[in-house]
Image (cartoon, rainbow, N blue to C red):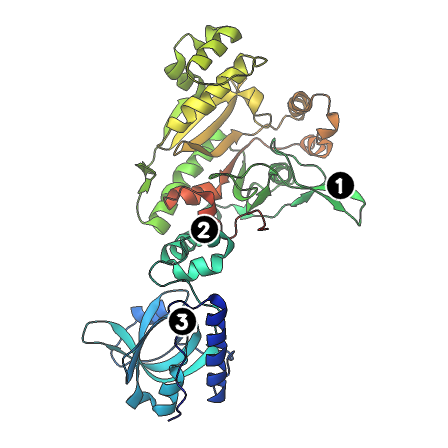
Amino acid sequence: MSDETPLQAPATQTSDEYREQRLANLRALEARGYPAFGMAFARNDTIDAIRNAYADEHPVRAAGRVLSFRNMGKTIFADLRDGSGRIQLFINKKQLGDEAFEAFGFIDLGDHVGVEGELFMTRTGEMSIRVRSWTLLSKALRQPPEKFHGLQDTEDRYRQRHLDLISNPESRDRFNKRIAIFREIRRFLEDRGFQEVETPMLQPQAGGAAARPFMTHYNALDCTMYMRIAPELYLKRLLVGGFDKVFELNRNFRNEGLDRTHNPEFTVLEVYEAYGDRLSMKAIIEGLLPHLCETVIGSMQIPYGDGTLDFTPPYREVPYQDLICERMGADWFSLDHDAARTAAEAEGVSCDPTWDHLLVTHEVYDKLIERTLFQPTFVTRVPRAFIPLAKACVDDPELADVFEFVVGGRELCPGYTEQNDPLAQRKAFSHQAGDEVEKIDEDFIAALECGMPPAGGLGLGIDRLVMMLTGTEAIRDVILFPQLKPRG
């Protein structure tokens, strides 16, 4: 046996010294016939599948990253992890042979290896692979995060998500749930006859919502373009064109603030159903959320913040005006705007002196009421002035036939009886645009004039949904690569 031994890291070793140690181990492995960055390795299956199909002495081929290493002299125990799970490796000098055993001693934490052997249970009941041969697949030149504490610094977790996923199983589990939520949303809608479509992310005019867009210049066309703030106007064009049930699950972009519940690049599900209305959208929400709870989370009750969300339908439905009167008094809507502003400020709501009664009321809702709606709640009959793309309630033209679906004190999803009257839509757009008539989307109005069927529509914030279903309180924890200010 060679006199050369694996390099061991001193407790005070710097990151550069760790890297030099790993490079030295790389050279030692290559000298023994183990190339540092190997070829493809044919596995029997994932580690999780291998564990689930356990049979004593069953031959297996597995591959993954070495995340722990315990050298007992003539036996080495190591933990091997792939994207599905972990399993223990049992590496014995007598069974593996002197040269292969010695070479394995130069493996560092984080290295990828492939192994061949058979399954067995140790005396302590630990499922293991008795390794007969192994190969180096990829050498890690940087030290992974410390095993028991993982990557603890919050900003480092966002900036180096790859290390977060390696070292924090709860983070990896959260993103696996996010992926499963996407899959089950598609399955739920497709089973009900909806078709997934794609609409432009670069648009000549930002529409479908009121938000500040990201702007860019389209060199080939020599014109200003906008990253979309919502896909709504394009999806409605598809209703005009004869697609009866459509959905899009994709990104929107808004050049606005960053906080615990907002990211400028975010994912939204938008659904439109010809010949539907607000009630058909309500039925989708009361079907989809229980489906996600059952298939992905495994429970209708989900701990969130200081309470527990219960997604068992039906969900509470309450008119906007009723909520205002419950909080501010039954005579609220008979007050003039000065009296309303005084009453709101007495409750701690800051109001601009120029605001009318409508704006004061909505500030009261936003600051005092919405945050109290913890359990899933449909807030209906919202003032139409705030929602130019929806139809009015049949019995009151000042109110929109919509719901705002609120969970955990935050709006998760609006649902509309969509406006399909091009004359009414033009009037609403004109009121919203004021003197900036160029902001009216004439192409969309022209499409409506070709005849859009009555329809229901909704827009579900997927990032916030994942937060609530996984009991997560910061949006950056459910986005793999959230937006961050560059360092330096």
Query: What is the three-letter code of the residue carrying label 3?
Result: Leu
* Residue in front for this viewpoint, 112 or 361: 112
Give the left or right position of residue 395, taking residue 469 as reference.
Answer: right
Eyeballing the image, is 28 above or below 405?
below
> How dense is the environment of label 3, judged by Cα within 10 Å: few (below 14), some, or many (20 and up)?
many
Q: Disc 2 marks which residue? A: 187
**Residue 255 location (% of width, % of height):** 61, 38
> Which residue has dot 1 on it?
224
Front-most of residues 232 and 43: 43
Front disc: 3 or 1: 3
Q: Distance between the residues labelled 1 and 2?
A: 37 Å
Please tell me whether mark 1 sits on a helix, a strand or a loop: strand
Where residue 224 sits: x, y (%)? 75, 41
Amino acid type at circle 1 is Thr
Q: Which residue lies furthest to the bottom in this view?
A: 1
Residue at 36% from the left image edge and 65% from the top image edge? 85
Is label 2 in a helix, a strand or a loop?
Answer: helix
Residue bearing mark 3: 109
Task: Note whether residue 191 is visible.
Answer: no
Sequence-first tag of 2 and 3: 3
In this view, 321 is above or below 310: above
User: How far apart are the alpha carbons under marks 2 and 3?
Assistant: 39 Å
Q: Residue 213 carries which label?
A: none
Q: Residue 300, image x and y in percent?
A: 31, 42
Mark found first going from the N terminus, 1 or 2: 2
Label 2 crowding class (10 Å Cα cut-off): few <14, some 14-19, many 20+?
Answer: few
Q: In this view, which residue lies farthest toward the front?
A: 12
- As helix, strand or loop, the secondary structure at mark 3 comes to loop
Residue type at tag 2: Arg
Q: Sequence order check: which comes first, mark 3 or mark 1?
A: 3
